[in-house]
Image (cartoon, rainbow, N blue to C red):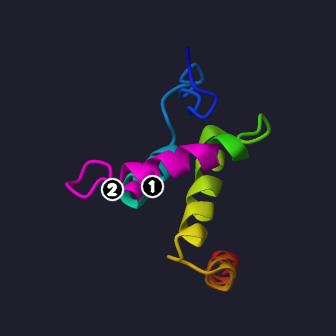
Amino acid sequence: MASNNAPRPIDRTDGEPTFFDKRIDAMLSLVTGQGTDSYRPDLHKRAVELYASLEDPSRSYAESWLLAIRALMLEQGVLREDEIDRRLHALQHALKR
C-alpha cells in the first residue's frame, strides 16, 4: 500500500523526461544529497512531504517538485524570499533582452 506522502511516478506516456524535468531531478538530488556520502534522509523525507502538499493536477511533476525544493530551501534557511525574488527579477530582465 503506497504512502499518501509518496510522490507519484513520472508519467512517461507522453515521452521521455524533458530537459526541465531532468534539471529539477538534478536539483532535488543536490538538495537532499542523493548519490553522495552526505545523503540526508530527513531532507529527502521533507522534500517528499512538501511535494505531496504542493501536488496539483494543473502542474507538471517537475513544477510541483520545483515548488517543493523552493519551500525546502526557504525552510532550511539556504535562501530568503527576497533573494529568490531578486534572482527571478534579474533572470526575467535578462530573458527580455
Q: Is residue 6 left or right of residue 52?
A: left
> For the residue carrying disc 1, how many other residues have a C-alpha within 10 Å: few (<14), some (14-19), or many (20+)?
some
Q: Is residue 76 left or right of residue 86?
A: left
Q: Residue at the location (45% across, 55% down)?
A: 43
Name the front one of labels 1 and 2. 1
State the CA–CA distance, disc 1 to disc 2. 8 Å
Determine whether the residue tagged by mark 2 lies in a helix, strand or loop. Answer: loop
- Contact, mark 1 vs mark 2 (Cβ under 8 Å): yes
Determine which residue is flagged by label 1.
43
The answer to which of 95 and 45 lies nearer the viewer is 45
The amino acid type, in three-letter code, at marker 2 is Gly
Q: Is residue 82 left or right of residue 48?
A: right
Can residue 67 be seen?
yes
Residue 45 image offset from top left, x and y in percent: 48, 46
Q: Residue furthest right?
A: 58
The amino acid type, in three-letter code, at marker 1 is Leu
Q: Is residue 96 magenta?
A: no
Split into 4 quadrants, where in the image is the C terminus?
Answer: bottom right
Q: Is residue 34 left or right of residue 45?
A: left
Determine which residue is flagged by label 2.
33
Can residue 20 be seen?
no
Write down the region rendered in magenta.
32-51
Q: Residue at the location (55% across, 14% down)?
A: 1
Residue 65 image offset from top left, x and y in percent: 59, 48
Vertical comparison of 81 with 34: above or below = below
